[in-house]
Image: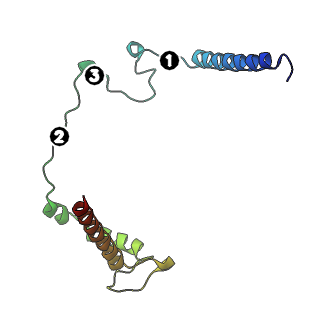
Amino acid sequence: MGELFWNKVAGAVLATVLGVLAITELGHLLVPSHAAHELTAENTAYPVDWAALDSGQSAEVIEEGPTDYGLVLAAADVGAGERAARRCAACHTFDQGGSNGVGGRRSRQQSLAASVAQHSLAAKLAAAMALRA
């Protein structure tokens, strides 16, 4: 190392900091920012409901009760369900104990049984851990 090595390192660090500050200032000159009191419909990037902002009121939260699945099922479209099932049938079967589909995918009954088994195993493990504690 020469006797001016650390001077060169300090100069490189200062030049980098100066370059970052210069680029930041250039960005501020090219893209002006606006203070909150200067915002108008012309200088915002998306539509804003200015009346709601001026009034200071928050949006009302509509509380919904429990879902009535009887109404949901009454409005269900059987044809849409069949179309969705056809997409699934490319890989899965709906038959009890059916064979694996494309790519070794399980039947829907096997998938549901695995899900139930996983949850029951998790419940058994949780109970065992509770007894240990």
x and y, in percent, of residue 58 in the image: 23, 28
Can residue 127 be seen by looking at this rendering? yes
Question: What scheme was used to colour the molecule?
Answer: rainbow
User: Is the residue 64 above or below the residue 130 in the image?
Assistant: above
Separation (CA) of disc 2 from disc 3 = 20 Å
Residue 5 falls left or right of residue 103: right
Task: Choose the circle earlier in sequence order: 1 or 3.
Answer: 1
Separation (CA) of disc 1 from disc 3 = 22 Å
Of the pair 2 and 23, the residue shown nearer to us: 2
**Viewer-nearest of labels 1 and 3?**
1
Looking at the rendered structure, the kind of residue marked 2 is Ile
The residue that label 3 is drawn on is 51
The residue furthest front is 132
The residue that label 2 is drawn on is 62
Looking at the rendered structure, the kind of residue marked 1 is Ser
Which residue is found at the position 40% from the left and 18% from the top?
40
Q: What element does badge 3 sit on? A: helix
The residue that label 1 is drawn on is 33
Q: Quadrant of residue 60?
A: top left
Which residue is found at the position 63% from the left and 17% from the top?
21
x and y, in percent, of residue 78 in the image: 26, 71
